[in-house]
Amino acid sequence: MAPKNKNLFKSFKLLDAKEILPQKSDKADFSGISGIAYDKKRDILYAVSDNGLFYRLKIELSKTKREIKRLEIVKVSRLKKSDNKPIKCKRDSDAEGLSLHPKGLLVSFEREPRVALINKKGVIKESLKLPKPLRKKSSYRKKNKMLEAVLYHPDFGVLAAPELPLKGKNPKLHTIYGKKIRLHLPVSGSLTAMSLTQNGNIVVLERSFDPIFRDRKITLTLIDPKNSKSRLIAKLKSADGYRLDNFEGLTHIGDNRFLMISDDNENPLQKRLIALFKIKEHPL
């Protein structure tokens, strides 16, 4: 994924990256992954797809935690409504973000903007009330650029962010919305995921694609929610030799190591990539 002898960022180190090849399994095709969350206590990597599938995965690293040895699908099912019936309608099943929560997992949905609390079998237990600016579909800029990322923060509760700034808001500033907090960062692309660090800061993932020059960019930004300060961690460009794709999932797996995964949009021309990286978390 990375060009040789390239280390442009003091707070970021790409450790490993691999293409996820189709598995000879009847469990389902690992495609369209849009959100991931790692449960350290259970050693399970959860994932959701924009087709409404819910995955339980096993991720194995090397002893040095610098290499991805294996990623295996353990179980896959459809996300289910509270009555235990599968969510089949595309409008209702477009899951985009995933985050651990003390009572299970949080899932954000795009085309019908909402955040749901699910159990670890993928069954919706409760629909949560969004901050007021995020409730109306008409507030979003595009139908497929609505509610994207979700995160549970132990101090600030449920945080959610649209892929693009809302209508009428500064188009050069992303906003992360909480019940009693607003966080801002400069726009470098579409905001696709958020993850918590071990010190309670937030890593934000953005991605962009230039259809003319075929150049992909991935931006990682660190935000301190206590003082709203932010700092660029890394800006990776395919033009610099990085092998990139449509990265949409991000999760912390411990020791300031993170996994990042791409959504192939069920397009044979795109790749399903998983990347392992480490950051240095200096005070902001």
Image (tube, rainbow, N blue to C red):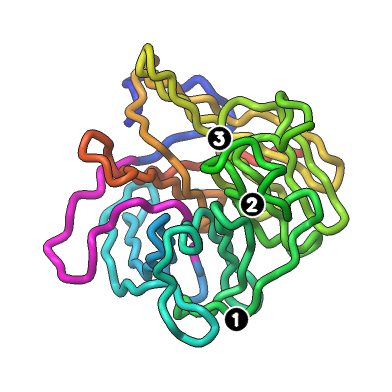
Q: Which residue is mark 1?
A: 125
Quadrant where the C terminus lies? top right
Image location of residue 235, percent across then percent down: 53, 25
Image location of residue 264, percent across then percent down: 32, 43
Is residue 30 a member of the stretch shown in magenta? yes
Q: Amino acid at mark 3?
A: Glu
> Is 116 placed left or right of 37 in the picture?
right
Crowding at mark 2 (Cα within 10 Å: few <14, some 14-19, many 20+):
many
For the residues labelled 1 and 2, say whether their Cβ atoms are less than 8 Å apart: no
Q: Which residue is mark 3?
A: 206
- In primary-sequence order, the first of circles 1 and 3 is 1
186, above or below 198, in the image: above
The residue sitting at 47% across, 44% down in the picture is 248
- In primary-sequence order, the first of circles 1 and 2 is 1
Which secondary structure lies at badge 1?
A: strand
The residue sitting at 86% across, 42% down in the picture is 227
